[in-house]
Amino acid sequence: MEWHDPDAPVDLSPVGSETIRWVIDQAIADGNRVVSLAEWTRALVAHMEQGLTDALKADVQARYPALTYYEEAGSPHNPPDEGVIEGGFAVSFPRPRSRPGQGPA
């Protein structure tokens, strides 16, 4: 098995959507980073280390109003996240888990 430096940048060349690449690049410019690329049933997903900022979310919605936004509450096995998806490619930003007795975060 080959050793992989967890701090090394993730190769984003497989991400074939210019729109999703733009979102990723903007998040990186804001200090976020991609922690992994993973196959999902509907898309190749770039998982970000930090959450989606309100400013980037607004920029994405203004620039790409037809882009599909999603928000997942999470499960015992998957953390909550939000992001955007287009044409078999997506970017996922983590969201905080809500605590029992509290509403969604």
Image (cartoon, rainbow, N blue to C red):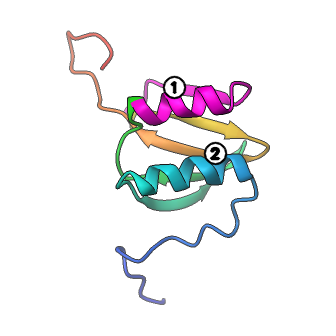
Say which amino acid is labelled 1: Glu
Residue 3 or residue 47, whichever sits in front: 47
- Tell me the quarter of the picture where residue 105 sits: top left
Who's the residue at 37% across and 81% down the image?
5
Q: Which residue is mark 2?
A: 90
Up/down of 47 relative to 73, above or below: below
* Residue 1 located left or right of residue 70: left
Q: Tell me whether circle 2 and circle 1 mark residues in contact (CB < 8 Å).
A: no
Query: Of the residues under marks 2 and 1, which one precedes in the sequence?
Result: 1
Who's the residue at 50% across and 50% down the image?
26
Give the tally of numbered discs: 2
Q: Which residues are magenta?
A: 55-78
Instruction: Determine whether the residue tagged by mark 1 lies in a helix, strand or loop.
Output: strand
Up/down of 35 relative to 84, above or below: below
Q: Which residue is mark 1?
A: 71
- In the picture as drawn, the residue positioned furthest to the bottom comes out as 2
Q: Tell me if residue 78 can be seen.
A: no
Is residue 64 one of those drawn in magenta? yes
Who's the residue at 43% across and 29% down the image?
74
Mark 2 Cα shell of 10 Å, populated few (<14), some (14-19), many (≥20): many
Residue 92 or residue 53, whichever sits in front: 53
Q: Tell me if residue 74 can be seen.
A: yes
